């Protein structure tokens, strides 16, 4: 009887080990990027762009305004307008930069409520090969620069 009890205890111990290891490996918080709804709610607001004086105001309706500097933002002196959309992990921005259209394609590298680091991708064309330019990196989606936005008030 003692032998059967020890055998049962061993089986229970093994079963508990298996269950615990599965519980730890099945739950993970290492998602590459937030779901679209979460990202679109985080992106709405005012952002300071790194490496530039621009302040970007991103609206929930897919529009936005860029201000050339803090003074223009404080005085509500609008600079350029843009439209943005999110689909399949990509944020696409079309900027009307004083009569000239500029297109940006970005994916999230890291995101929090107050800081977003984007991978901003080069858009190759008939006249432009990004491999000939100085971009930060290259991955399966193409050549990219890192672009940081920090929430502005």
Image (spheres, grey):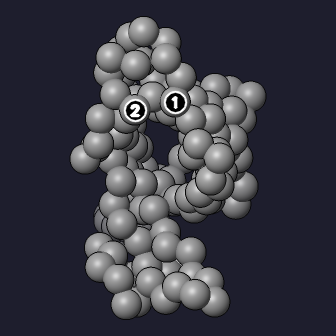
Residue at coordinates 56% horizontally, 35% vertically from top-left?
80
Residue bearing the label numbered 2: 68
Q: Position of residue 117 (x, y in %)?
A: 36, 50
For label 1, the crowd category at 10 Å Cα-Cα, with few meaning under 14, some 14 to 19 and many 20 or more, is some
Residue closer to the observer: 75 or 130: 75
Residue closer to the observer: 136 or 110: 136
For label 2, the crowd category at 10 Å Cα-Cα, with few meaning under 14, some 14 to 19 and many 20 or more, is some
Name above or below for residue 124 compared with residue 65: below
Q: Quadrant of residue 82?
A: top right
The disc at residue 79 is 1
Quick check: can you spot residue 8? no
Residue closer to the observer: 16 or 111: 111
Quick check: can you spot residue 136? yes
- Mark 2 falls on what kind of element? loop
Outermost left residue:
51
Pick whichever of labels 1 and 2 is earlier in the sequence.
2
């Amino acid at each position: 009887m003692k032998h059967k009890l020890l055998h049962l205890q061993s089986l229970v111990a093994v079963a508990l080990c298996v269950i615990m290891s599965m519980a730890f490996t099945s739950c993970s918080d290492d998602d590459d990027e937030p779901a679209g709804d979460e990202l679109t709610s985080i992106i709405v607001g005012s952002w300071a762009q790194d490496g530039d004086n621009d302040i970007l105001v991103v609206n929930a309706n897919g529009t936005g305004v860029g201000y050339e500097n803090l003074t223009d933002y404080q005085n509500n002196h609008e600079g350029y307008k843009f439209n943005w959309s999110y689909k399949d992990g990509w944020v696409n921005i079309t900027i009307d930069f004083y009569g000239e259209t500029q297109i940006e394609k970005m994916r999230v590298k890291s995101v929090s409520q107050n800081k977003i680091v984007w991978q901003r991708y080069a858009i190759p064309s008939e006249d432009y090969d990004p491999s000939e330019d100085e971009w930060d990196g290259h991955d399966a989606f193409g050549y990219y620069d890192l672009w940081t936005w920090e929430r502005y008030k």
